[in-house]
Image (spheres, rainbow, N blue to C red):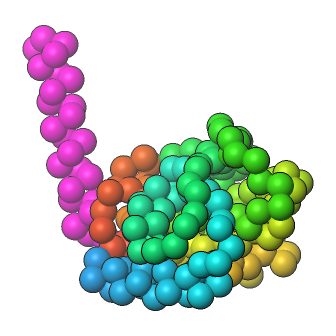
Amino acid sequence: MSNELEADRRTIERVTELNALLASCDVLVTEAEMQAIYDRMAQEITQSLSERLPIVLAVMNGGLIVSGQLLSRLRFPLEVSYLHATRYRGSTSGGALKWLAQPDMLLTGRDVLILDDILDEGHTLKAVRDWCEAAGARKVWIAVATDKLHDRKVPNMKADFVGLSVPDRYIFGEGMDYHGFFRNVAGIYALPESH
Ligand SMILES: O=P(O)(O)OC[C@H]1O[C@H](OP(=O)(O)OP(=O)(O)O)[C@H](O)[C@@H]1O
Ligand SMILES: Nc1nc2[nH]cnc2c(=O)[nH]1
């Protein structure tokens, strides 16, 4: 078989495997439920920040979908940028935090709203919050689509706006990945307990 045909065969095999895995996962939250959750979060954020001219920072990559969903629901003046900090890097368990891009805006004296997909142990968002505070932010607000329930949280790490609490399982969808895939899946899924 030519190299090209062999590569095509492997790609098709991978697609089939991923589709089968997705079909075997538990749906924790549907797409429609997520839309209602984003509506409610946007209302809460609006109540707190509509007169604060905030800088909104998306935490890449996981915060991409949540940011798109929330930003278009926020009908008040704000600025948008991003940062990229990662500690899972395609794995299902966390390691050391690596900064790939720091915010490129002057945060001094500003209200800063951080948007991310999940508060799990909290190392990522604690480092991001500390960075923004050290950069002179007046107040750092944190909004996450999901907050994982367990007792391994970094002390004093809480989000100001939470979509919903999720069980202590590896989840994906709504920006969260499974080995780099499924960030684009609408709704929240969990790997089967046996996986
Ligand atoms: O609370 P923690 O235990 O620190 O985990 C939460 C972080 O983990 C994920 O990022 P990840 O490192 O997987 O990078 P990604 O956003 O590129 O997926 C997620 O997007 C959060 O930022
Ligand atoms: N995709 C995904 N990323 C995470 N980062 C921290 N916890 C999780 C999780 O449960 N799923």
* One can see residue 66 in this view: no
Task: Estimate the x, y position of residue 92 in percent, counting from the top left.
Answer: 54, 56
Indicate whether residue 18 is drawn in magenta: yes
Task: Estimate the x, y position of residue 47 in percent, counting from the top left.
Answer: 59, 87
Number of on-image labels = 0
Residue nearest the viewer, comparing 47 with 169? 47
Residue nearest the viewer, comparing 130 with 52? 52
Which of the image's four quarters has the N terminus?
Answer: top left
Q: Residue at x 42, y 55 (%)?
A: 178
Task: Estimate the x, y position of residue 67 in percent, counting from the top left.
Answer: 48, 62
Indicate whether residue 137 is drawn in magenta: no
Q: Residue at x 14, y 30 (%)?
A: 9
Q: Is residue 185 above or below residue 9?
A: below
Q: Residue at x 55, y 82 (%)?
A: 46
By secondary structure, the bulk of the magenta-drawn segment is best described as helix
Q: Is residue 29 left or right of residue 131?
A: left
Question: For the view shown, which residue lies furthest in the top direction?
Answer: 2
Q: Is residue 117 above or below residue 102?
A: below
Displayed quadrant of residue 125: bottom right
Which of the image's four quarters has the C terminus?
Answer: bottom left
Q: Is residue 54 left or right of residue 140?
A: left
Displayed quadrant of residue 112: bottom right
Q: Residue at x 30, y 68 (%)?
A: 186
Residue nearest the viewer, comparing 184 with 166? 184
Residue nearest the viewer, comparing 15 with 105? 105
Task: Estimate the x, y position of residue 118 in percent, counting from the top left.
Answer: 57, 68
Q: Is residue 52 left or right of residue 180?
A: right
What's drawn in magenta, residue-wise? 1-26
Q: Is residue 168 above or below residue 86?
A: below
